[in-house]
Image (tube, rainbow, N blue to C red):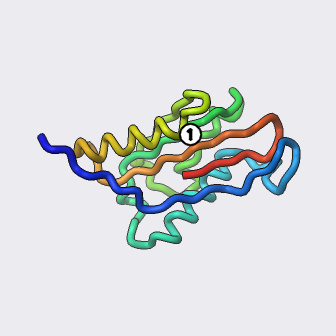
Amino acid sequence: MKARNAVLVDGIRSPFARGKKGKLEATRLDEIGALLIRALLERNPQIKPTMIDDFGIGHGASQHEVAGLGNVASLAGLPKEVTNFLTNRQCGSSMETGLRIAMSIMLGSYDCGISLGAERMGRGAGGAGS
């Protein structure tokens, strides 16, 4: 079997700031992730939500925020058929999700996926990116 090419179509990130400061301080990580996915889909109208097969979130989130990360796809308006997974590898979480999505595309498991990284430093404004 010959591996297919995986192509990165676009990337986006949220604003970030030092802990306990910034516009996103009180915004939940799942809301930030959903905002980013909606922005990516708006910037790339040729990619329909129904084309997305899998969605990975690499996180360094606290325990109470991890439970909410499963809501990102729903909050972003993705179909309920879109599968998702969470990965916590401390500093390498978002890289892990990107590699898993790319590998699955290269092996023909699916055609389109989203990789998202989410982190909140203390109680400050979190950063999330895709």
Q: Is residue 57 above or below residue 31?
A: above
Q: Residue at x 52, y 49 (%)?
A: 73
State the residue at coordinates (57%, 65%): 39
Quick one: 76 or 115, which is closer to the camera?
A: 115
In the foreground, 27 or 100: 100
Could you say which quadrant of the image residue 52 lies in?
bottom left
Residue 46, position as x, y percentages in the image? 39, 71
Front residue of this view, candidates 120 and 70: 120
Q: Residue at x 45, y 49 (%)?
A: 80
Q: Position of residue 57 (x, y in %)?
A: 53, 40
Left or right: residue 109 compared with residue 33: left
Q: Mark 1: which amino acid?
A: Gly
**For residue 102, above or below residue 48:** above
Residue 3 position by quadrant: top left
Q: Secondary structure at mark 1?
A: loop
Residue at image location 67% in from the left, 51% down from the top: 31
Q: Position of residue 83 (x, y in %)?
A: 41, 42
Task: Count numbered badges in the picture.
Answer: 1
Characterize the local packing of mark 1: few (<14), some (14-19) or many (20 or more) Cα atoms within 10 angstroms: some
Whether 123 is drawn above or below 33: the answer is: above
Q: Residue 66: x and y, percent?
A: 64, 33
Question: Picture quarter containing residue 91?
Answer: top right
Q: Quadrant of the N terminus?
A: top left
In the picture, measured across the screen, residue 28 lies left or right of residue 88, that is right
Q: Residue furthest right?
A: 20
- Identify the residue under disc 1: 70
